[in-house]
Image: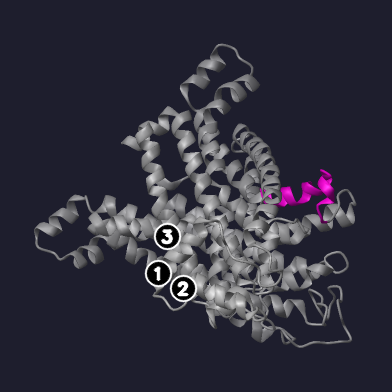
Amino acid sequence: MMLYVLKRILLFIPTLLGITLITFFLMRSLPGDPVANMVGERATPETVARIRAEIGIDKSPPIQYLLYLKRLFRGELGRSLFTNRKISDDLMQKFPNTVKLALAAMFFASIIGIGMGVFAAVKHGTGWDRLVTLLSVGGISVPVFWLGLALMLLFAFYLRLLPPSGMGNGDLSYIILPAATLATFSLSYIARVTRSSMLESLSQPYVATARAKGLSESEVVLKHALKNSLIPVVTLIGLDLGSYLNGAVLTETIFGWDGLGRYALDGIMKRDYPVIMGVVLFGAVVFVSLNLLVDISYHYLDPRVRVKKVT
Amino acid sequence: MLNNITLKDLTGNISALVAFVLLVLLVLTAAVGPFLVSYKPDATDLDSLRQLPSKTHLLGTDSIGRDILSRVVFGARISLSVGILASALSLSIGVFFGLLAGYFGGRTDTVLSQVFDVFLAFPSLLLAIGISAVMPPGLASAMLAITLVGWAGFARLVRGITLSLKEQTYVEASRALGATSSRILKKHILPNAFPLLLVAGSLRVGGFILLEAALSFLGLGVQPPTPTWGSMISQNRTYINSAPWMVLFPGLAISITVISFNILGDFLRDKLDPRMQV
């Protein structure tokens, strides 16, 4: 057990190095003067001299990469070309907002996705089943940023039920539209997987036994079939965290949600390269770390996963 | 395996049939549509700004009086060509490295698999943003970004398929007869992996089209005045309340295209690859 965890953590290190190698390479492949790309055109000569020494401009690329790693290790992601604020400070300030939005979306996606999947499985072969299947294909096919605008048009402008954008100082009504938008992609996958997993469970002998001993249909479905159908669904939810980071960039842009995504877009608009790379690197590290945690926790929680890994 | 799909299969599955017909229409639109529309996509008409859909402008006009229908039709070219080309490119790269890793195993496999994992470690849109941000924005950079995001997934899939195929007796027999590695890969492994690759490729085209739309929306794709569906949405989104058609139509175009690809991909998977059924 410990060995498995240790092995996973050891395998994590080359992945992290690979990620930093890619961001390092991307930063270096920018056209123009690398120092200007990092500090902007208006930097003072002192700053330019300091950065030149810091990134080892006169040293070979491998040494420059090591210096880059050293800076990353100390949590230094550089400064924004425009605000001159530390990117690490900005990220720490924006990230909680993205987490809040993602958690709300995940809650929404899980409840409604599982509900839709169970409903479709129970109504297997009917028009309802086909409707859920079609909706779940639609949900992964519609562009997030367009869906957000359409929901905003309907619920904020036509029906006037919800605020169109902003964060409203934590007022819950402000999170509903962005969370629903961000949830749709994941929700559709959850509905799909729940449906097929439920169909499989419902055909198992223990379900027939449960029916035979006279349990009500809802007890059979919820207590017996659903409980046993949830493992692939929970796995999916755990492994799909990346889709929330992707979706957040677009959703936050639409709804003016002050998180990582909108920060990234500001960076893109202003060609603020250190900011863009900071978000890309941070997003990737968060994503792989979460996947590692999910993996390790499954290992503890579900003995079946453990057996599968060995074979 | 491919011969098993008949026209009857397609006509028996209504949603797959509809998706297929829609895609044929879309390809035709992208190919000849631009010659049929009555307005140039970037011709501005300052006397008819933000017009509702009407007989003269079937889908209305945008904030500088450009015909939305013409722009949507031109946008189909970009979306379809980026989606299909990026799939083909990333699939080719994926096949090459996946075959290498799966067939030769050992240290080659260890190193290559690690590289696949690193590329897959990035959330896809973030990596695409990082790649396209460092290049001059345009069709080539969007295509390259999407290809670099997509290839590793294909490579991992091909590696897995190759690992199982190379243990088959016919491969062993061929090796015993003295066939070279490249011959075995070309004559035995690739043809047998083909149906699975077709399924994987067709399931990914939709996702690539969405990625291109997202990059365009963020200003990192093909640049104005060339119309793309994603950039039409981002340029007009401030008018969502007063002139929603300017945003709704390009978004519908993306949605219909991607839904069709996904439904057809699901259909192919069900027919060709019973193992992958969800």
Contact? badges 1 and 3 (CB < 8 Å): no
User: Which residue is at the far left?
Assistant: B177
Whether B206 is drawn above or below B143: the answer is: above
Type of the residue with mark 2 = Gly
Q: Is residue A256 magenta?
A: no
Question: In the rendering, which numbered label is found on residue A93?
Answer: none
Dot 2 or dot 1: first in sequence order is: 2
Q: Are marks 2 and 1 on the same chain?
A: yes
Report the residue at 54% width, 51% height from top: A287
Q: Position of residue B33 (x, y in %)?
A: 64, 80
Question: In the rendering, which numbered label is found on residue A18?
Answer: 3
Q: Position of residue A86 (x, y in %)?
A: 65, 62
Q: Which residues are magenta?
A: A165-183
Indicate the quadrant where residue B216 lies.
Answer: bottom right
- Chain where mark 3 sits: A
Whether A31 is drawn above or below A210: the answer is: below
Indicate the quadrant where residue A164 lies.
Answer: bottom right
Dot 3 or dot 2: first in sequence order is: 3
Residue under circle 2?
A56
Type of the residue with mark 1 = Ile
Left/right placement of residue B20 relative to residue B255 reads: left
Q: Are marks 3 and 2 on the same chain?
A: yes
